[in-house]
Image: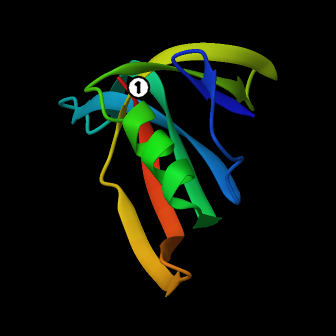
Amino acid sequence: MIKINGRQLPKNPSDYQIGIYDLSKASRVASGLLVIDRIATKRKIELSWNYLTREQLSELLTLVSPVYFDVEYLDPQTDQIKTGSFYCGDRQVEAFDYRNGQIRYKNIRFNLIER
């Protein structure tokens, strides 16, 4: 479904959403007409997992720890596999419970934002 720096994620996400965003500069001319200059179109991939083991969470967070990294994903607009340079937004993790000496995690979520 998605690869980071050529590596498959340790577990497929429970939720996978792709947003397509236009970066633009807009201003009005003397006649009042709005003029928009589209600078670029970028992708934001929203990922979440219901539950992960300690090992899976550690591997996942390590994959997204560099400032920038390559992400391979299926682009919904082109219906093609694309690779782009991304960075990771804030990462949120909740502890689920502590069982048999092992902590388990739930509701892991973060966004990958195209550079």
Seen at 47% across and 24% down, the residue is 41
Q: Nearer the viewer, residue 43 or 100?
A: 100
Relative side of 63 to 19, left or right: left
Seen at 48% across and 60% down, the residue is 109
| Placement of 52 over or under 40, stated as above or below | below
> Residue 47: where, in percent of width, then height?
56, 52
> Residue 8: where, in percent of width, then height?
66, 28
Image quarter hosting the C terminus = top left
| Placement of 46 over or under 40, stated as above or below | below
Q: How is the image coloured?
A: rainbow
Q: How many marks?
A: 1
Image quarter hosting the N terminus = top right
**Dot 1 surroundings within 10 Å: few (below 14), some, or many (20 or more)?**
many
> Residue 111: where, in percent of width, then height?
44, 47
Seen at 64% across and 50% down, the residue is 17
Q: SS class of the residue under badge 1?
A: strand
As shown in the figure, which amino acid type bears the numbered disc 1?
A: Phe
| Placement of 58 over or under 85, stated as above or below | below
Relative side of 68 to 86, left or right: left
Relative side of 1 to 55, left or right: right
| Placement of 115 over or under 93, stated as above or below | above
Q: Quadrant of residue 15?
A: bottom right
> Residue 25: where, in percent of width, then height?
26, 28
Seen at 43% across and 48% down, the residue is 58
Relative side of 50 to 104, left or right: right
In the rendered image, which residue does mark 1 sit on?
Answer: 86
Residue farthest to the front, as pictured: 100
Q: Nearer the viewer, residue 22 or 58?
A: 58
